Image: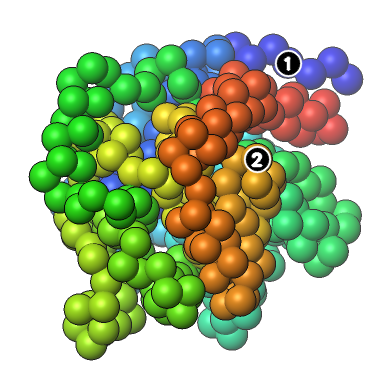
Amino acid sequence: MKAPQNSHFRVLWITQNYPPSKGGMAESCDRIVYHLRQAGLQIDVLHLFERATHPKVRNTQGGREFIFPIDADIAHTFNLVWNFLEEQQKESQWTHLVAFGGYLPLLAAPVLCSWLNIPLMTCIRGNDFDAAIFSPKRREVLYEALRNSAAVGSVSQDKSQKIKALFPEVPTYFTPNGIDCSTWQAQGSDQQAAQKWRETHLQEGRKLVGLFGHLKEKKGVVFFLKALGLAQKNHQVHLLFVGEFAEDVKDFLRTHGEAFHYTHYPFMDRFTLLPYYLACDAVAVPSFYDGMPNVLLEAGALGLPLIAAKVAGMKDVLEDEKHGFLFAPNDTKAAMEAIFHFAESDSEKLKNMGQHLQQHLKSQFSIESETKNYQKIFQEMSAKK
């Protein structure tokens, strides 16, 4: 059977993570949907949005957006969702269903794809797998979505391998994040603001390390701070935190904060972050486990090296001593060595590492590559129908 062209695909894309929701998953969802629409796919996004007060339908180029409120009674929510989708399907004639991360899309997708009689693609990011796989309450929801999928896309190769081991009969694909280096780049004003920040906040002889995003427990922030102290480099490094602190980070800094030099800002919109990235000598991603954080690609695309755990997306993208300083996750001694090597590196070495990473991302992790990965999956799903 010949696979239909992109223009013949009409995808129903269910997610809890889409603008105006905040965070890395919402940014990724928006990016992927936008570029797939640009490539010719019709995509209708069903956004399960907890702050919505009533259902809304909005037409946009390349599809529609359905905003649906989440009731306290989830079963009630999805019965209403089905009533809505059943009517919409008469006109839309969807060809594929995508569940894009989050507990509720995974919960609903196996039932909805059966009732709509269309194949399911489940997109596994990071936390939707890591938080569910060992959870007595959530694992069966994850399993049900995976075993009913015609395809599974994962942002890291380690998760693809884990899913294949659990469900060898389900086609599983590596779908790494991409970044558009033509739009994500520094302007002169960003460079000036970065330099001004360094002059104002950074004492001579110290290097600036940035940690960005929702700094929750799995991100290994407290682990990294402890390793920084044990390496006796805490007085040579200034830490720039931008994002939300988890309670473990707050507690640690409340007790031990005087031993570190740091500045903290709350969550910022993506492009507002540019001067803060550019002010850094390196960006740290010391996660115990993860997907493929946008921070990894955003920092690298600006020419910054990474201090990162050799896990998930970091392991897929980075090469030690070429793109930054890597260490085994949750390995204090290895993290101390990586921090030590960073602190002892001169500015020229760090700049070269950042440039190597920037070129690597442009050639291997572009928006075009990301979009083609998803197009290929839709085509192969259709060919098997």
Where is 160 relative to 381, above or below?
A: below
* Residue 65 pos. (x, y %): 34, 32
Give the residue number, with chain letter if any, for mark 2.
322
Nearest the eye: 337 or 285? 337
Nearest the eye: 299 or 341? 341
- Residue 23 lies left or right of residue 251; in this view the side is right
- Res 104 label: none
Give the residue number, with chain letter if any, for mark 1.
4
Counting every numbered tag in the picture gives 2
Q: Check the picture and name the quadrant holding the N terminus.
A: top right
* Residue 12 pos. (x, y %): 51, 35
Q: Please name the residue shown 38% across and 24% down the image.
A: 184
- Residue 221 lies left or right of residue 147; in this view the side is left
Q: Earlier in the sequence, mark 2 or mark 1?
A: 1
Q: Amino acid at mark 2?
A: Lys
Which corner quadrant of the image does residue 245 belong to?
bottom left
Give the CA distance from mark 2 to mark 1. Answer: 42 Å
Where is 303 relative to 321, above or below?
A: above
* Residue 358 seen in render: no
- Residue 22 lies left or right of residue 224; in this view the side is left
